[in-house]
Amino acid sequence: MIARLYQSQDAEALDKLLGVPQSGDVRLAYDRIAVLDSSRGPVGCLVWRPGGIVHELRVGNGLGQKRRADLLVQFGIRDAVSRAYCLHEAIFITDSERMANYAKELGAIEQTGKRVFSLEVRK
């Protein structure tokens, strides 16, 4: 499996990952979209907005969930720091307990309120 940027031929797979009708808030004109590609096509996605706001991380079910999430997050960090964004922090917004636990495992710190995590982005 390899993480890479979204391409137009990934549209159908992305729709399936996010749910149809789309339950996520993905905007092709604004977001950076990474997909985790396997021999059977995209099996995960990470959607973030320049500014470091992560609002979609979909990796499906099964034993490889954490591995898929790790590959996508590592790709997102590399993409963010390789550009002129000068990002030093990412913000995870979630109402999912599983995503909250994953953000904590990454080292993110829960902010005042509920389910908002900031993560220091390092090269």
Image: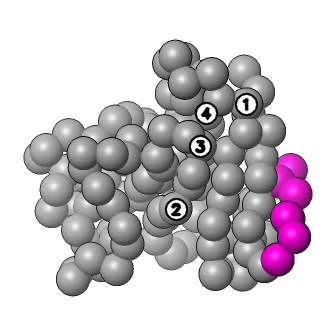
Q: Which residue is mark 4?
A: 77
Where disc 4 sits, the SS reads helix
Task: State the extent of the magenta-drawn residues as a range.
Answer: 107-113
Observer-nearest of 40 and 60: 60
**At x 78% / y 70%, what residue is drawn?**
101
Q: Which residue is mark 3?
A: 52
Q: Quadrant of the N terminus?
A: top left
Checking the image for residue 88, the label placed there is 1
Answer whether residue 1 is visible to the viewer in this image: no
Where disc 2 sits, the SS reads strand
- Among the two numbered marks 4 and 2 on one chain, the one whose residue lies closer to the N terminus: 2
- Among the two numbered marks 1 and 4 on one chain, the one whose residue lies closer to the N terminus: 4
Dot 3, how many residues are within 10 Å of its Cα: few (below 14), some (14-19), or many (20+)? Answer: many
Q: Which residue is mark 2?
A: 55
User: Disc 1 to disc 4, how far (Cα)?
Assistant: 10 Å
Q: Are marks 3 and 2 in contact (CB under 8 Å)?
A: no
